[in-house]
Amino acid sequence: MGEVSRLFKNGRIATAESSELREADVLVDVAGIITAIGTGLSTPEGAEVIDCAGCLLVPGMFDVHVHSREPGDEHKETLATCAAAALHGGVTGVVLMPDTSPPVDSGNLVKSAMDLVSEVSPIPMFQSGCLTKGRQGSELAGFSGMASRGVPMLTDADRTVSCPDLMRRCMEYARDFDLLVTSHTDTPALSKAGVVNEGRVSYRFGLPGIPAISQEIAIDRDILVAAHTGARLHLQQLSTARGLESVRRAKEAGTKVTCEVSPHHLVLSELDIKDYNTHFKFNPPLRSVEDNGALVQGLIDGSIDLIACDHAPHTEFEKSSDFGSAPFGAAGLETTVLVLHDRFIRAGVFGWDLLIQRYSDAPRKLIGQKPVAISEGTEAEFFVFDPAAETTITRDYLRTKSPVSPFIGETLAGAIRGTTLGAAWYPHEA
Amino acid sequence: MSDTGDIIREEILSPEGIQEAIAVMARDIAYRCAGDNVAFIGIYTRGVTLARRVAAVLKSQGLEYPVGTLDISLYRDDFDNRGMDLPRLESSDVPFALDDTRVIIFDEVIFTGRTVRAALDGLMDYGRPAKIELAVLIDRGHREIPIQPDYVGKKIGTNRDQYVKVRFHEDDEREGVFIVEKRSGQTPHPA
Amino acid sequence: MSELNPRKDLLDIESLDLEEIEYVLENAVPFKQLFQRSVKKVPTLRGKTVLNLFYEPSTRTSSSFEVAANRMSADVTNFTISSSSVVKGESLLDTIETLQAMRSDYIVIRHQAAGVPGIVAKHTGASVINAGDGYHAHPTQALLDAMTIREVYPEYKGRKVVIVGDVLHSRVARSTSTLLNKLGIEVAVLGPGSLIPEGRHEFMTRLRSWDEVFDWKPDAVYLLRVQMERQEGQFFPSIAEYHKMYGMNSQRLVRMRELGAYLMHPGPVNRGVEITDEAMRYERSLISTQVENGIAVRMAVLHWLKPETDKD
């Protein structure tokens, strides 16, 4: 697949720096290096020409919140299908959550996970580690061993370290290794058996609610612990306006805190949950329309550092039970770029530059990786996007094992034509 | 209950013709039931009107018979075929003891006989009359079960697929007995 | 004949339009009249089967449906599944498969999880009647409550009903209030702040004490059952305090008499908690009427719904 050079002809290059698009041809040599960018490039002998007329060339996205499910839950997803889904969605690198079975809570388990990744994955996948042993929230996991294996972050993935004392010790200990502590912000004593945002919708559906304060209190607590300990803190999946306000205040005060938002918390609200559709069951839950607006604003003004999709595959069978019993989460890697383009870029709310900053640059920087751009002398890492086409999200469209997505059945503006990573080119089937 | 979409093809009885037929029925009942403990039961909707009209004629002659009502919807044998017509139930009212009573059931038309079969079942859940008879304004033939009327206002010959409609001014805009053509799409209700 | 579209399932009150509500409530009246006959049965559903599928024990509701189905000559199978024998959620689709094979015409279902009757309805041709799902809905309870109120107040529009107790965890409060609101009846709620959610229906006026209730001049007071095992200590300090603050006692009964207000309760009552023995004997108590109307309304519902298993 890689033994050929490729000329991406007549595309328009998107960058993080500017919303201006540069019309150019991009030549990628057999080694996967971009050797020339310019208009009217001649086609080298034997090169494959990819017609990009009307299309954009966009730097590969990077998602720091992905559940690969392997090992342990390969019926939901595997590393291979996860990587295929990422490439299919224009994502060329991910951070894997440690909530596999067994949970990745030691250096040895990080090593075996990375070994598996290098065997099966065509894209870089960084394995994160647990904060506490077995994600049980009672003892510190093996920080130094995991640090020596290069974990990008520590997190108990979908579980909060509910004991404030233990969270403090986590941060104190992580600080000395300069490890990023990542928090799923939730207060279990408040969210209890909740499954939707507490409010009118939870009342109507007769479902136990998760109050906004469940996340807001956890955000405040972790920010205070971070400020107290001086550790680096990353907050996962902001869902409320008030939580965002806390982050803004903390940043102004100089606390080392970053945060992410998931596409579903930007574009969907609790009002979109119809007929007990479990594809809309998320943790944190979909909140109010006002929260959607505040989060979009936070994303634009930079209070929210980055986008992460929380790719959480489940089988259709698992999601076919009642709303209360069905697991939280849905697949996201293949819909994030399409949905954000459809709802925001096309609507003029923000440009490609912002999407690249928040979903390509910032996530890489968060874990100490270099941002990628389409420039001469660098490895090719971009996808081809046709804004004039459209994509209907169906089971057949998705490469993930999990046909669970709130966007199933939707037709979105724009289509990804293919993704190139180094010398490899992964075209979408026509 | 007005079938607004019906197209009238032929008038069989005028309002005057109906009154004459009712008078015939009243005379027949008075003669044959003399001395008996008689009560009328009208089947909703127009059987009730018919029973009341006959009772009124007899009352003017000094014969007073009580009139009860019966909704036989719950006794029909075609409940599965209710289709788009959701039956609105009426209150059945049998305000007299049936035992030792000669009960005359009234219906406006007898056709297949199935409505009367349902009425017999319904009536007998209220008690055990000494005798049950049947009075109809129109007998149009084409019976599907062995039930025959005892008192008939008028007997007419019809085709199996025609519709015979009795209209009373109490229930409808225009009184008369008509052969009508149904709006397309309606399914016949066996009467 | 009416222009109503036939409906396969009864899952909640919100999706019913006023015409459908009127239809069922009006048909329930002739059904209730049948109870005065020595033969209380009609042959309407002869040969049809009704499956009473109860994942939560409820003798009252399941018996009421059973009596209703029997009086329409349907064959009833009672199926009570203790939640302990079910792997939570997982086996629901398998259970539905089994139900399909039984070829029931009507499935009456009670389940502890909101939304389950809807899932069953989607996967079966039988008419599904929600007999209570989680905190979500209990539509036949709402219909019987409305029938009961309409009997005592034929001019029911603009009347006032106050619902007292645990509005947060009550599917009865949700369904009954929604129906009363659709019928143009005003609804208020009284109960501890911890059990009166902010997200409740906008039309539910919050009253904070019995004094406020009596100043509001309700035409009926609807007491909800206190779920004692669930709430004591969590949502209010003690049963004794609940009784003192929100229970129907002799002093409050005096005010009820002055107003001529009716008393309702979905049953079963906790004597000495939400209601005293004395209040149980209140001459304007509609509690046993509610039970009787429950059968009539459920007959009207069985008569109304149209399973796909009907041949036509």
Image (cartoon, coloured by chain):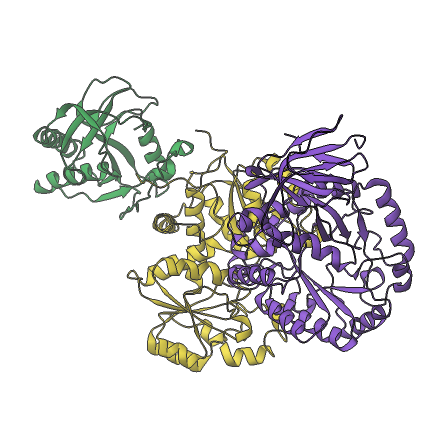
| Palette colour of chain A | purple
In the depicted view, which residue is nearer to us: C17 or C262? C17
Residue B129 locus on image (x, y percent): 31, 39
Query: Is residue A53 toward the left or the right of residue A381 in the image?
Result: left
Residue at 56 percent across and 73 percent down: it is: C194
In the visual, does A230 lie left or right of A177? left
Up-down: is B18 above or below A14?
above
Where residue B40 sits, quadrant-wise, is top left
In the visual, does B99 lie left or right of A44?
A: left
**Residue B177, how many percent across, how many down?**
16, 28
The residue shown at (12%, 39%) is B58
Q: Quadrant of the C terminus of chain B?
A: top left
Q: Is residue A139 visible?
A: yes
Q: Colour of chain C?
A: yellow
Q: Return the x and y of residue A239 as percentages of the image width and height.
A: 61, 62
Look at the image and give the colour of chain B.
green
Residue C58, position as x, y percentages in the image? 57, 56
Tell me if residue A281 can be seen: no
> Toward the viewer: A357 or A397?
A357
